[in-house]
Image (tube, grey):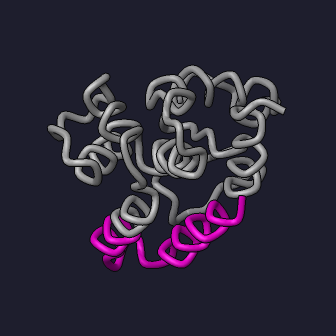
Amino acid sequence: MNRFDKFMQIILLNEGGLSDNVNDSGGLTKYGISQKAYPKLNIRALTIEQAKAIYKRDYYDIVKAELIKDELLALHVFDMAVNAGCSRAAKLLQKTVGAPQDGIISNITLGKANAGKFVDKYIVERIMYYHSIAGWKNEVFFKGWINRVIINCKI
């Protein structure tokens, strides 16, 4: 099984199926793909294969997860992109490895990420980010965010 397919098993486990949680600003969501992010997409009719194609094109490829040598770090960067956006995932990686924080994973960022062991520091940065946004509006999601970080650590 290739890396993307392996990661997608975890992403789909984290994201679940059809959901219309009133507390979720994304609105109607299926497999983690939200109506807010994809307003022209029929979310109810979305297939797993369509969701995977979206994840590959709009998240996995954007954060260059295939080029991050440390598989666990790559998973966390990809999952963070899914959960908080590609720019946020990239900025956390850049902060972690000491690269300029422009939100775009460049060869400089990749070079630094691939030159050392940064997964533990990235996980801490993720948790700190979630804690920083877990005010009254997002408090209901905080436990789930932390659980997805823990699940990702079990690959």
In this rendering, would 108 be left or right of 130?
Answer: left
Is 8 in front, or is 45? 8
Q: Residue at x 42, y 49 (%)?
A: 84
* Image vertical order of residue 4 relative to residue 61, above or below: below
In this rendering, would 94 be left or right of 16?
Answer: left
In this rendering, would 98 be left or right of 59?
Answer: left
Residue 19, position in %: x, y? 70, 54
Quadrant in the picture for the C terminus: bottom right
* Image vertical order of residue 137 relative to residue 58, above or below: below
Residue 48, position in %: x, y? 81, 33
* Image vertical order of residue 62 relative to residue 70, above or below: above
Q: Residue at x 70, y 43 (%)?
A: 7
Residue 5 position by quadrant: top right
Q: Main secondary structure of the magenta part?
A: helix
Is 72 in front, or is 92? 72
Residue 3 position by quadrant: top right
Q: Residue at x 36, y 31 (%)?
A: 110
Is 101 in front, or is 73? 73
Magenta stretch encompasses residue 137: yes
The magenta segment: 127-155
Q: Residue at x 31, y 51 (%)?
A: 92
Residue 114, position in %: x, y? 41, 38
Quadrant in the picture for the N terminus: top right
In this rendering, would 104 be left or right of 63?
Answer: left
Magenta stretch encompasses residue 132: yes
Q: How many marks?
A: 0
Residue 126, position in %: x, y? 39, 62
